[in-house]
Each structure stands twice: as structure tokens, then as C-alpha cells.
Amino acid sequence: MGPARSTISPLRELGAYEALFMQQGATFKTLAEKFATDTAALPSDFVSHQEADQAAASVIEKLHKSGVYQFGVRINKAGDYPAKLRDAKHPVELLYYQGTWELSEMRGLAVVGSRKPSEDGAKRAVRLAKELVARGFAVVSGLATGIDKAAHTAALEAGGRTIAVIGTPLGEKYPKENAELQDHIAKEHLLISQVPVLRYAAQPFQHKRYYFPERNATMSALTEGTIIVEAGETSGTLTQARAALYQGRKLFILDSCFQNPAITWPARLEKEGAIRVREPEDIWKVLVTE
């Protein structure tokens, strides 16, 4: 990555990013392809300053209305944008965040899985999160119900650090039942979103689900690896599994998944490079220790 420009306006780049997403047919894939053609380009190189500034003002207004007054952005080619995100197939140019950005620099593992886990699955997520904390790792997840919530909560109860990568803009609370947890993570830990505020607000509800698999790829890129606790054959968690393998991250699958006769994905992903976890030591022995 080249040197950061010295005259970047975060607010203008935010607005330009949002304006690009308001263009017809814009997706994370098409924008990634646009920026790949000019590796020195910033969002404002593709949008007029007037359009960018107007979009930025609209974003600030919407965020304020949703109760978000303090937040930051990380822009590719500008300062503290994490280089590891470029490993994603369609890397994002800008992230919104609330909380302590420095947590993104910790060693971290994602703990993910079903929104409706078994009782044993939820307990496994709790045990894993607590062990990660004990070993000095940040616990990263997506703030969904089920496994995600269990992992975030266990990390907090163990006195550790947790990062939530969400599939909505910062001011949105989904699911509603996790609103208090989201607020706590935003204030005391780290909450990250790549979701464009204006595009999200303009879209019909049924289109908004497509942001969740996109955030899974970003969550994977932010971490050293992903641990799948429990997931069905068509779970969105498998999007993150494929992203982890593509990005060269470690992919860990708990042995209990292999024991489930109703699913075939664990054996398939193991053949592609995933690691079967029969005991916690199977995780630690393959991670490079510092």
C-alpha cells in the first residue's frame, strides 16, 4: 500500500462513498472492481465534491436521528485503515466504527454460528470465548442472536475485549433484542459497519439481508481465523467459511458439527483446508504464537 495522502477529508470521502452506493447497480463487488482499476483512487475521485458533501450532510443527519453522534471512519489509503482487509475478495474502501479502534489491532478470532443453536452449541460458544479471552485474543462476532450473542456476552463476562461487525448501519439495531449489547460494545469495545447509510435507508426491507454475507467476509479478513461452533446446511455462516479459506485465514470447525448426520458441509470444508477441532488445543497448536 502506498503512502497516505496528506489532504484527505474524511467527511468528504464518507460522502463520496455513500454517493457511489446510490448509483444504479452499485454493489460491494462493482465498487471493488472500480477501485481495482485505479489503486491510488479515493471515493472522491469518482464523485463531484458537491455531490459528496451533500451526501455526507445527509448521512450525518440520519445518524444523528438514530442516536449516533460519535463515530469514526477508516478509509483505504488513509492512515489507520487495516491492510489485512485487502485480502477480501471485494475489499471495502471505507468502514464506519464506534468505540476503540485499537482493538482491531489485537489478535482476534471470530466465533460464529447458528442463530438458533442447540443448548450444547451455545455452551460451546461460551467456553470458547472465555478461553480466547484467557489467551489474550479479542472475540469477534456479528451481533446476531444465538452463537454470536453468546460469544460476545461470554467475552464481556470474562473481562475480555470484543468486536462486533454488523450487517446494518451504525444507528440500526438488529436484532432489537441485542440493542443494549450493541450500545455497550459501541461505547466500551468496538462496533464496525461497512453498510452505506443512505443506500440502506432507501432500500426495501427484503434487500437489506444481502449486507450480512458481505460483512461476514470483512469479519473474516479482520481476524486470524474463524471458529464455526454450529451451523445448518444453508447457514449464512458458510459464507464466512468460504471467505476465510479464500483469504488465507484459518477456518476451525468444531467436531460436534462433523457428528451431525444432517449436514455435509464440515467434511467438504475440511477437504478444502478447514481444521477439525476435537479439543481446544487443536486451535492453539496451528496458530502462530507470539
Image (cartoon, rainbow, N blue to C red):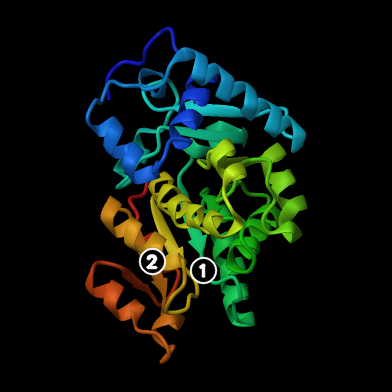
**Residue at the spot 76% in from the left edge and 34% down from the top edge:** 65
Above or below for 38 versus 202: above
Above or below for 42 versus 203: above
Tag 2 residue: 252
Quadrant into which the N terminus falls: top left
Q: Which mark is residue 113?
A: 1
Lower position in the chain sequence, tag 2 or tag 1 = 1
* Amino acid of disc 1: Gly
Q: Is residue 82 left or right of residue 190?
A: left
Above or below for 11 versus 242: above
Quarter of the image where one finds residue 227: bottom left
Mark 1, Cα crowd under 10 Å, few <14 / some 14-19 / many 20+, is many
As drawn, the residue found furthest toward the top would be 7
Q: Secondary structure at mark 1?
A: loop
Mark 2, Cα crowd under 10 Å, few <14 / some 14-19 / many 20+, is many
Residue 23 picture location, percent across and down: 43, 35
Above or below for 202 versus 262: above
Q: Secondary structure at mark 2?
A: strand
Residue 98 picture location, percent across and down: 63, 35
**Residue at the spot 35% in from the left edge and 33% down from the top edge:** 83
Quadrant into which the C terminus falls: top left
Quarter of the image where one finds residue 157: bottom right
